[in-house]
Every structure is written in structure tokens, then in C-alpha cells.
Image: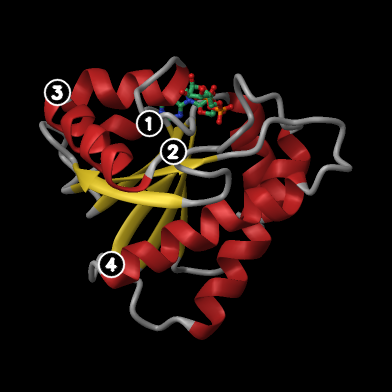
Amino acid sequence: MNTRIGLIQGDITKMQTDAIVNAANSSLMGGGGVDGAIHRAGGPAILEECRMIIARQGSCKTGDAVITTGGMLPARYVIHTVGPVWNGGKKNEDEMLANCYSNSLKLALAHRITTIAFPNISTGIYGYPKREAAKVAVNIVSRFLETDHFLDKVHFVCFDEENHSLYKTLLQL
Ligand code: AR6
């Protein structure tokens, strides 16, 4: 059990952390699932900044992360990352998913963010098996925290009971 990792079942848009992470797509133009919920709750400022990012750098690649304001959300920032679409497991999905978490955490540190909340990236519309995704997420975040001493708390926010129970077991809570 790592006291710098928290587990919550609920809606990530309600999190009062410095940043919340969005499971976006490479266009950064919004979508369904958690992406839709974040844009709805955060308002148009987020989409406006996403547009500027796309104009500057082009699309956001799988595993990469970018940062915008949180708009009307309680969180100050939204870190948008693009998870892999599940393709059977032999297309480097695990590495790309791990990159989502580590690149989001690196970006958080660059902005002096100390509290951050992650959804279960790729486990909805993108079809990544929940158990496999949870193992990747817990491993990479735990490893990251071994060498980082700046972050206070990383929350995993699970929307559904199945993910919540998988994380509970993996985190030994
Ligand atoms: N708070 C926390 N978690 C949530 C919420 C919420 N409000 N709503 C859904 N989830 P998904 P993906 C969970 O489909 O699989 C979008 O259209 C959900 O139960 O949101 O990475 C994007 O634009 C699931 O466990 O993201 C992309 O096109 C997890 O969030 C595509 O979907 C991720 O599910 C990304 O697919």
C-alpha cells in the first residue's frame, strides 16, 4: 500500500485536485465518455486551448499528453492524453498506455502540480481489457513515485464498480 496513491469511485470532473487527466483522442476536439464529461463540465475554454495546441503542434499522438486550463472545473488544469485503441494486445498497447500515465505525470511536474487524478484510460470506448489496463496503470504510477518526491497524491478515479474493485485488489486497499 502506497499512501501517495488514492482510489475513488465516482466522477472525475468533481475532483478538487490541481489537475485531472482526460482520456482524449488525437484530435483533442472532445468526444464521448470521460472526454465528453470533462468538456461539458469545464466549458468552452478547454476546447479553445485544445484548438490552439492542435494549430501549433498538429494532432496529439497516442501516449502523448498536453495541458490546458480546467475552465469551470474545480481542478486548475486538465491534462489530455490519448490512450491506445485495444487491438488484441500485440500492437504495443501496454507500452502506449504506460506512456499516457508517465507523460501525464511528467507534464504535471513541469507545471508544479502536486495532486492529480486519473480516469481508467482506454477502458471504455477504446476497449482495453480492464484488468490488464489496471495492472499497467498501477505499475507505472508506483514506479514513477519511487523516484519522484514532489507529487503529494495520485488518485485513480474509477467510474464503474468493476474497475474500482480491480484497483482495490491491486493497490492492496
Ligand atoms: N469520470 C471518471 N471516469 C469516467 C467518467 C467520468 N465522468 N465517464 C466515463 N469514465 P472512455 P477511452 C470512465 O470511453 O476508452 C472518447 O470519445 C469509463 O467508465 O471515456 O480512453 C474520446 O474522445 C472508462 O472506465 O475513454 C476518445 O475518442 C474510462 O473512463 C475515446 O472516447 C475511459 O473510458 C477514448 O476512449
Element carrying mark 2? loop
Given residues 68 and 42, the one toward you in this image is 68
**Are the residues tagged 2 and 1 within 8 Å (C-beta)?**
yes
Residue 59, disc = 2
Element carrying mark 4? loop
Given the image, on which type of amino acid does mark 4 rest? Thr
Answer with left or right where residue 104 lies relative to residue 63.
left
Depicted 59 relative to depicted 29: above or below: below
Going from N to C along the chain, the mark reached first, 3 or 1, is: 1
Residue 154, disc = none
Cα–Cα span, label 4 and label 2: 27 Å
Which one is closest to the eye, mark 2 or mark 1? 2
Q: What residue would you read off at disc 3?
A: 44
Going from N to C along the chain, the mark reached first, 4 or 2, is: 2
User: Residue drawn at (21%, 39%), measured in percent from left and top?
Assistant: 52
Measured as percent of width and height from the top left, residue 164 is found at 59, 36
Going from N to C along the chain, the mark reached first, 4 or 3, is: 3
Going from N to C along the chain, the mark reached first, 2 or 3, is: 3
